[in-house]
Amino acid sequence: MPGFELFDHQERDEVLAVMEKGFTFRYNFDAMRHGIWKAREMEQMLRDKLQVKHAHLVSSGTTALHTALACSGIGAGDEVIVPPFTFVATVEAVLMAGAIPVFAEIDDTLCLSPEGIEAAITPRTKAVNVVHMCGGMARMDEIKAICDRHGLVLIEDACQATGATYKGRALGTIGDVGALSFDSVKTISCGEGGAVLTNNDDLYEKIHMFTDHGHDHIGTDRGAEGHPIMGTNYRISELHAAVGVAQLKKLDRILAIQRRHKAKLKAALSSFGEVTLRHLPDPAGDNAGFVSFMLPNEDRARAVAQALNSKIGGVFYWWDNNWHYLRNWSHIKQLEAPNPLPIHTMAHPDYAQVQLPQSDALISRTLSILISLKWTEADIQARIDAFDEVLR
Ligand SMILES: *Cc1c(COP(=O)(O)O)cnc(C)c1O
């Protein structure tokens, strides 16, 4: 998954262009910047590449998610359905928006299941935040149909799935609004950064204003701009966008390498009777940043993870990991925060008591291997040999 593995003179040249001729701020300063607008350039590239009407760069995937919620009108007391298997940022964004996360079951796609979403809907549900984990995708047709039927906003956290598609459409562009992350370890990297994607003009107007203190971005005098709404500062800098411009040009190459490497590991893994590969509703659209598979039970999964990690490294056993599954999120279970949050003042689920037996049964058996862009044929063979030794 990590685009940083392909950093070279191209990223450096883009950053240097900003330092030597441009300016670090993404708006205004027209006279100083000699026509260099890296954030605008990357946004145009994203719109073309992902075939989406609006792409707005922000400071991170987390701030993209908060922006998606806030600008969709999701706030105090609203329930947002989220998966228990995600990076904690998905849940943080809901809490920071003042809303209430409601956990629902995932299925063998490793994403929210349509059935799980349906079972979690209450009269207070306003949105579903489906997370396309590990480069793959959720069952989007069914999930979209449920959201349409119940009048729910469909948010796609595609932070781990830049460049992935479902039936030909980019993940993050299928629901009402999507979020991408370009942090240091994602498919493409700005160092830190993210994007909010939408085809909705009204939503986009709120997005660019909310992420820049409510500035309406009309005219060339920033001090004279109007402020139709309150907002905050979730801007990306030109330096980060410059790195992203170079990385986005490499996205097709990154996806091609990942898909080639993953196909070899998948072929090897599928020969072992005890291995079940993660279900991909549209295999052709997989971003292939990870290969994920299930073993028969928790003990076997933990043992295989340990044995493989000692030989090849790069194997994630999410069940024991502190950051990607609800089981180990003690801070979220207790709603530990430095300040009182809206959720502390309202009725909310007891997060220490959430029961998700189907998700537990899946994640306790699931391993994911990060696909490196730098592997040689020998590196891939070393992994296949390790599978032969550990899985039989
Ligand atoms: C990385 C990630 C985020 C947050 O992105 P940042 O840019 O690190 O803030 C959100 N959701 C998921 C699923 C992620 O993997």
Image: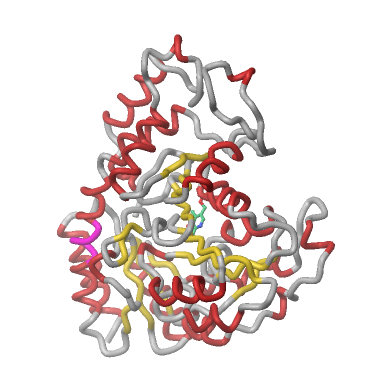
Q: Is residue 43 left or right of residue 112?
A: left
Q: In which quarter of the image is the C terminus?
A: bottom left
Q: Residue at x 49, y 71 (%)?
A: 148
Where's residue 229, x and y in %? 67, 38
Question: Closest to the observer: 111 or 16?
Answer: 111
Query: Does the image show residue 20?
Result: no
Question: Closest to the observer: 206 or 371?
Answer: 206
Query: Does the image show residue 22?
Result: yes
Q: Which residue is drawn at 66% across and 35% down?
A: 228
193 up-or-down from 87: above or below: above
Question: Closest to the observer: 127 or 98?
Answer: 127
Q: In which quarter of the image is the N terminus?
A: bottom left
Quarter of the figure with residue 232:
top right
Asked whether residue 191 is drawn in magenta, I would say no
Where's residue 290, x and y in %? 34, 64
Q: In this view, does 213 lie to the left or right of 238?
A: right
Question: Closest to the observer: 53 or 305?
Answer: 53
Q: Residue at x 19, y 75 (%)?
A: 267
Q: Residue furthest left?
A: 377
Asked whether residue 261 is drawn in magenta, I would say yes
41 up-or-down from 81: above or below: above
Q: Give the range drawn in magenta.
A: 258-262
Where's residue 32, x and y in %? 45, 10
319 up-or-down from 178: above or below: below
Q: Residue at x 31, y 61 (%)?
A: 165
